[in-house]
Amino acid sequence: MANKSKIVAHLPSSVELSKRTTQNVLRIDVKLEGTKEGSLHIARGSVEWWPDYKKVNAHRYSWKEFIAKLEQSPERRSKR
């Protein structure tokens, strides 16, 4: 059976995350088989994962920490 997932991005009217004064955050809600798993918040200075079951504490990474975490992953793909 195929895994049914739904990814919804909430975009502000203008998305420029590189400005120092921006309040824009790219929020991506992740739903798997109809159940919300959490939200990924992408901002200028960090990336945060907010699990749906945990309303208070997010997993917060600076961009350097996030890249290091991804590079630790054993699964890699090559370009097609």
Image: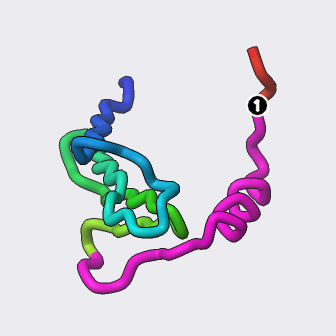
Nearer to me, 10 or 58: 10
- In this rendering, the answer to whether 73 lies above or below 57 is above
- For this rendering, which residue is in front, 36 or 67? 67
- Secondary structure of residue under mark 1: loop
- What's the magenta region? 54-76
The residue to which callout 1 is attached is 77
**In the figure, is residue 63 to the left or right of 36?**
right
In the image, 60 versus 53, the foreground residue is 60
Name the image quarter holding residue 57: bottom left
Give the residue drawn at x 39%, y 60%: 41
Please tell me which residue is depicted at 34% across the width and 68% down the height of the picture: 51
Left or right placement of residue 1 versus residue 59 in this view: left
- The N terminus: image quadrant: top left
Percent position (x, y) of residue 5? 32, 35
Q: Position of residue 78 (x, y in %)?
A: 80, 26
Q: Which quarter of the rendered picture does the C terminus lie within?
A: top right
Quick one: label 1, few (<14), some, or many (20+) residues within 10 Å?
A: few
